[in-house]
Amino acid sequence: MRIRVNPTRMQLLRLRRRLELARRGHKLLKDKLDGLVQRFFTLKKDYLELRDRLEPELAKIFGQAAFAYALSAPEVFATDVQQPTVSLDTTVRSIMGVRIPDYHLKVEGEPVFNDLLSSVELREAASGFSAILPELVRLAALSQSLRLVAGQIIETRRRVNALEYILIPELDRNARLIVMKLSEQERSSKVILLKLGG
């Protein structure tokens, strides 16, 4: 990215101000990037711990559900089952400028099955899934948070690199170029004055 500038003292002052601003912005973005990376690893640790804890429980519940489906009569799944009332509240919090969702699940009641048709395994699977559902919602929130923070890390890293490797070197090069041109003009003015005076 070439910045075309006129070699004047005003332009040199503008370039130096822009260079100082770019360096301060680079430092702030670098600090933000470090904070985001640190927060990302904390979220990742929480996500992996929760996922590792939930996977065996889910496998057990799905196994019970498959076993219950095999043992139960088809009429069990055709009849209406009274479902619990479920609502999901979403709040948003900010982590270093990244809007992260928090999900809060409210479950009222338990699924009610026809006692004559449903098996014990089906009831166990349903109650196990009801018990694990809030943790699954928390896992989904952590997953979404990881995605959003990772996207912000990539964007911030791009900006830091653009400042560090493109804009700051170009501004610095142009400022040095203007200083060289101004000193050259000053020397040529002195030579002209010496020739005129001498």
Image: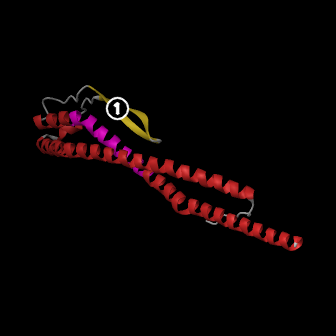
Position of 146 relative to 110 (above/below): below
Tell me: 150 left or right of 166.
left
Q: 159 or 135, which lies in front?
A: 159
Percent coordinates x, y for residue 76 in the rendering: 18, 36
Residue at (45% x, 47% y) in the render: 31
Position of 68 relative to 27 (above/below): above
**Amino acid under disc 1:** His
Q: Residue furthest top?
A: 109
Q: Quadrant of residue 66?
A: top left
- Which residue in the protein does label 1 denote? 104
Residues shaded magenta: 129-151
**In magenta stretch: residue 182:** no
Tell me: 40 left or right of 81.
right
Q: Quadrant of residue 100?
A: top left
Percent coordinates x, y for residue 58 in the rendering: 19, 43
Q: 111 or 71, which lies in front?
A: 111
**Is most of the magenta stretch helix, strand or loop?**
helix
Residue at (15% x, 34% y) in the render: 123
Percent coordinates x, y for residue 127 in the rendering: 18, 33
Q: Residue furthest front?
A: 198
Residue at (32% x, 44% y) in the render: 43
